Amino acid sequence: MITIEPIGYVRSPRGDLRDDDWGSVSSSIELDAAFSPECLDGIEEFSHAEIVFLFDRVAPARVERGTRHPRGNPAWPRVGIFAQRAKDRPNRIGTTIVEIVGRDGRSLHVRGLDAIDGTPVLDVKPIMAEFLPRSGVRQPQWSHELMHEYWTVTPRRRDG
Amino acid sequence: MITIEPIGYVRSPRGDLRDDDWGSVSSSIELDAAFSPECLDGIEEFSHAEIVFLFDRVAPARVERGTRHPRGNPAWPRVGIFAQRAKDRPNRIGTTIVEIVGRDGRSLHVRGLDAIDGTPVLDVKPIMAEFLPRSGVRQPQWSHELMHEYWTVTPRRRDG
């Protein structure tokens, strides 16, 4: 057993679980007061970061350890939990690459984070091109279909 | 506090901590006996996976929560721990994208995993192109210098 502690939390306008349209979401990672703002020094030199977070709304009893249809859709093949990115997975860890928008104090402002308000954050890592795939990416057709509207940018509400 | 449990362990010919030359390393992720082999079903349809693991050799007391020079090299700027990928980081979580070579039973065979033998694995996620950066990656010069020989493929020893 390993014990971990959130380094901070997601502050997002999105508080509901939804499958699609994450591309337009601007949110922040608010680091815990135990961290000084300096732990983000230099992150603005990177365009992207990977956010490691916990799908804390998934009840441990709902965690899938075998196979399932992605999104419960029988049109897609039943695949192992480690062959999909579903949130009800062992250890309930999510990882997403986001755009870095800026920072101030203990807040890191990002775009395209598919985690709802209040999500515990476990780590922030800068993206280096050298850590991206170094050969062509191949993936099954169902995964393209699943991702079709995931990042769709919905028209932004004018707040004033 | 959050409690997590390894889903398995890395089996790698590399047992020593080294900074470079990870490109030629072939290793396996051996899932815990609590998992049935089906939890990997369909992963062979993907070329790459992200491995989430624990830098368990880092003593908790060594974890950096502020700033440091990457690799302790004063030629590179002192940056925050969340602006670098050093292993002595809060929660000691590592993430690496590897090539999928194959699988049998509870073993997933991969290439290019920068984790030593015995490393606890927390998650395996398939790589979908849609989850890679959707705009150009920008990063500081020091990070290119640091990564210069990271994936270097060393000549393979002939074992027979």
Image: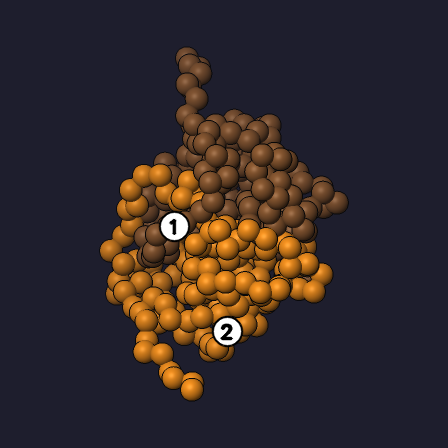
Chain colours: A orange, B brown
Work out whether residue B47 or residue B142 is closer to the camera in this orientation and state it. B142
Q: What kind of element bears circle 1? A: loop
Q: Residue B158 appears at what percent x and percent y? A: 42, 14
Left or right: residue A157 compared with residue A29? left
Q: Is residue A58 visible?
A: no
Question: Identity of the amino acid at label 1?
Answer: Val
Q: Is residue B67 left or right of residue B95?
A: right
Q: In this view of the protein, which residue sits in the foreground, B75 or B136?
A: B75
Of all chains, the one bearing label 1 is B
Between A150 and A60, the one lying in front of the other is A150
Quadrant position of the C terminus of chain B in the picture = top left
Judging by the rendered image, the residue that carries numbered circle 2 is A12
With respect to residue B37, does B24 lie above or below?
A: above
What x and y, as percent, mark residue B82?
58, 52
Residue B85 visible? yes
Q: Residue under label 1, please give it.
A: B137
Amino acid at dot 2: Ser
Instruction: Answer yes or no: are tags 2 and 1 on the same subunit.
Output: no
**Which quadrant of the figure contains the N terminus of chain B?**
bottom right
Image-quadrant location for residue A48 = bottom left
**Residue at the spot x=67%, y=40% of the render?**
B58
